[in-house]
Each structure stands twice: as C-alpha cells, then as structure tokens.
Image (cartoon, rainbow, N blue to C red):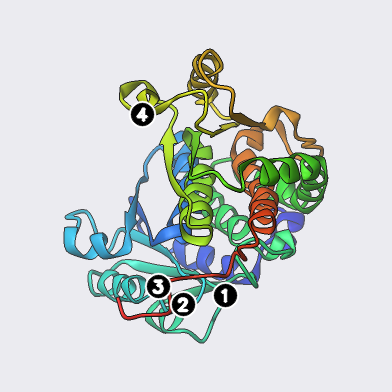
C-alpha cells in the first residue's frame, strides 16, 4: 500500500484491515435493516464482480439470526450497520456472529451505542439525517467502499483498492455538481407528483440500492406514499403489468454491467407510459473518478441525486421527511 493511499484511509477502516490480514477469510456477511441494509448492496456487487476466494451475502439482521447460516464461523467477516447503533435486531446479530467466532465490524454514527459495544471493531460515520450535507469522506457509503476494497486488496491483491480510494477523494465534488444539475428537475418532480398515490422506482445491479432506499425509506417511510422498488431484470416477469400511462415510474440507469437490463425496461416503458422520470448516470460529471470504478461509484451518486428529489417532494407535499406514525413512536 503506497503512502498516499494509507494517508487517505479512515483510521477506523485501517484498524479493521490490519486485523483482517491476520485471519483466514472465506466469507463476508452484510447484516443490517432498512436503509442500512440497502447501502450494503453496492459493496456486495463489488465482491461479486471482483472477489475470487471470498463469497458474500446480504441479510436482514433478524433473519440472519433465525436462518443461522451454516457457513458462519471463524472464517467469516460480518459487517453490520445501524445509524443509531440501537437497532435491536442488528445488535443481536452482532452478538450472535461473535458467538460463532466471526470477526464483527459495525458502521454507526454513534460509537458509544449498543451496536458498537457488541462489535469487535467500530467504524464511525457522520450523518445528521437521512439526506444531509455530510462531507463525503465521512459518509457510510464512502467508508464501506474503503473497507470492502481494502479487504480485497489484502486478501487477494486486488488492484481496485488504489483506484477506489483515490476516486473517493473526489466524490464530494461529484456530489455537488450532480445535485446542482438535477435541482430544477427535482422541483418539477415534486410539484408534478405531490398528489400521487403511488410511485415505483426501478433499477438493477449496484444501482438497486438507490431504488430501494427511495421507494422504501423515502416514499413509504418518510412520505407515506405507496411504492415498491422493482428490479429491472424482474420487470418482465410480472411487475410490468401495473404499467399504465398514469402511473409514475422512476427509472434509474447506472454505469455497471447490468445497465442493459435497465435500458430494456426503459425502452419498453416508453411505449406505454407518459410518466417516466429518468435519472441517467451517463449525465453525471464524474471527473476525478477512475474509469475502473465509475460503475461502482454511480449508485452512490444516484442515491445523492435522489436525496434532492426527496427534499423536493417533501417540500411540495408539506410533509417533512422526519414525520413518522409508528417508527420510534409506539412499541413494535
């Protein structure tokens, strides 16, 4: 690892990578709930594309415990995440994984939380709210990519690590450019669809995380709008039957190897719908991002752009993103 890369590494990530070097590792489990789980999808995609000796899985924290994977053990790295560090299912999953002998690493904004206490290593990120102005290098996505590509480098010598770390240094600038680029379009979206009763969001590959987060965490949780994230590859196996000229579909197009799936879904939908909201990563100014990692970085930028759309529809509906009926309000 060269000096420049070492200097750019988050200190918490560096500690985990040092521990990983001394362990046999054949499996990575990503374990969390809700948006914290979705943020792990791009890292899972990276491992699917790049890892030769390490398998990986993404689990809902509660199901992780109840399913009790037979492959979970001393050769496992379990990466968990909870913004508050108090998600009871994720805390329990950390304890469960440690009992099985796995190496546990948790990402959280609260380093004194129950999740941090239950885990061997803690990586602290910053986030005041779901879509805020956190400096890119302090964000969950940023640190997750440092961690995962660092593991690949130390265990398999994967050269992607250097390009990823260097490219992430320019992520903040990319964010600011794309947010400004889509600001007017997001406001038009908010005004146009503020009274919509249902909005679907579609993507594939590493970009599915952004579709999931917007459909579930924004539209359903924060705006009480009926929604569902649709996988572009599954679109023609049932979901496309709900397509009508009136139903809004947000179509995300990324830069990874699954883009043809998204393009096929968009081409079909244009024949039958007048309400397609297309956000295409080909429009992003990705200056400073290496070609080898643009496909991996695109979902992070898509998610940031959708944050602008979230703010716009919340303002148009006069329904703050922080409003809840049940979450944190009643026992469950």
Judge depth for marks 2 and 4 and give the one in front.
Answer: 4
The residue under label 1 is 109
Q: Nearer the viewer, residue 314 or 229?
A: 314
The disc, 1 or 3, on the residue closer to the chain's N-terminal end is 1
The residue under label 3 is 326
Is the residue under label 2 in contact with that under label 1 (CB below 8 Å)? yes
Q: CA distance from mark 3 to mark 4?
A: 29 Å
Q: Nearer the viewer, residue 234 or 301?
A: 234
Instruction: Classify mark 3: residues with Cα within 10 Å, few (<14), some (14-19) or many (20+).
Output: few
Judge depth for marks 4 and 1 and give the one in front.
Answer: 4
Instruction: Classify mark 4: residues with Cα within 10 Å, few (<14), some (14-19) or many (20+).
Output: few
Q: Is residue 111 above or below residue 11?
A: below
| Mark identifier at residue 85 | 2
Instruction: Classify mark 2: residues with Cα within 10 Å, few (<14), some (14-19) or many (20+).
Output: many
Q: Secondary structure at mark 2?
A: loop
Is the residue under label 4 in contact with that under label 2 (CB below 8 Å)? no
The disc, 1 or 2, on the residue closer to the chain's N-terminal end is 2
The residue under label 4 is 239
Query: How many numbered marks appear?
Result: 4
């Amino acid at each position: 690892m060269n000096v420049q890369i070492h200097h750019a590494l988050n200190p918490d990530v560096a500690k985990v990578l040092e521990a990983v070097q001394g362990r046999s590792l054949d499996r990575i489990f990503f374990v969390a709930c809700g948006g914290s789980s979705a943020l792990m999808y791009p890292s899972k995609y990276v491992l699917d594309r790049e890892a030769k000796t390490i398998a990986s899985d993404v689990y809902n924290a509660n199901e992780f415990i109840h399913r009790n994977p037979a492959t979970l053990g001393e050769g496992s790295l379990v990466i968990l995440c909870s913004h508050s560090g108090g998600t009871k299912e994720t805390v329990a999953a950390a304890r469960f994984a440690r009992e099985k002998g796995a190496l546990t690493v948790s990402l959280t904004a609260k380093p004194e939380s129950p999740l941090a206490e239950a885990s061997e290593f803690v990586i602290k990120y910053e986030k005041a709210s779901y879509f805020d102005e956190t400096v890119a290098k302090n964000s969950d996505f940023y640190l997750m990519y440092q961690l995962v590509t660092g593991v690949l480098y130390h265990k398999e010598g994967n050269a992607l690590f250097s390009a990823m770390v260097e490219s992430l240094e320019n992520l903040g600038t990319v964010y600011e450019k794309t947010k400004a680029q889509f600001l007017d379009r997001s406001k038009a979206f908010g005004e146009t669809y503020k009274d919509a009763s249902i909005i679907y969001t579609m993507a594939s590959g590493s970009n599915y995380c952004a579709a999931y987060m917007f459909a579930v965490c924004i539209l359903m949780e924060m705006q009480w709008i009926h929604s569902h994230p649709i996988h572009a590859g599954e679109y023609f196996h049932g979901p496309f039957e709900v397509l009508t000229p009136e139903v809004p579909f947000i179509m995300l197009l990324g830069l990874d190897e699954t883009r043809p799936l998204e393009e096929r879904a968009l081409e079909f939908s244009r024949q039958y719908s007048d309400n397609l909201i297309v956000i295409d990563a080909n429009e992003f100014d990705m200056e400073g991002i290496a070609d080898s990692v643009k496909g991996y970085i695109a979902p992070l930028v898509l998610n940031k752009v959708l944050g602008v759309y979230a703010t716009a529809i919340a303002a148009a509906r006069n329904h703050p993103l922080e409003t809840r009926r049940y979450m944190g309000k009643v026992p469950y």
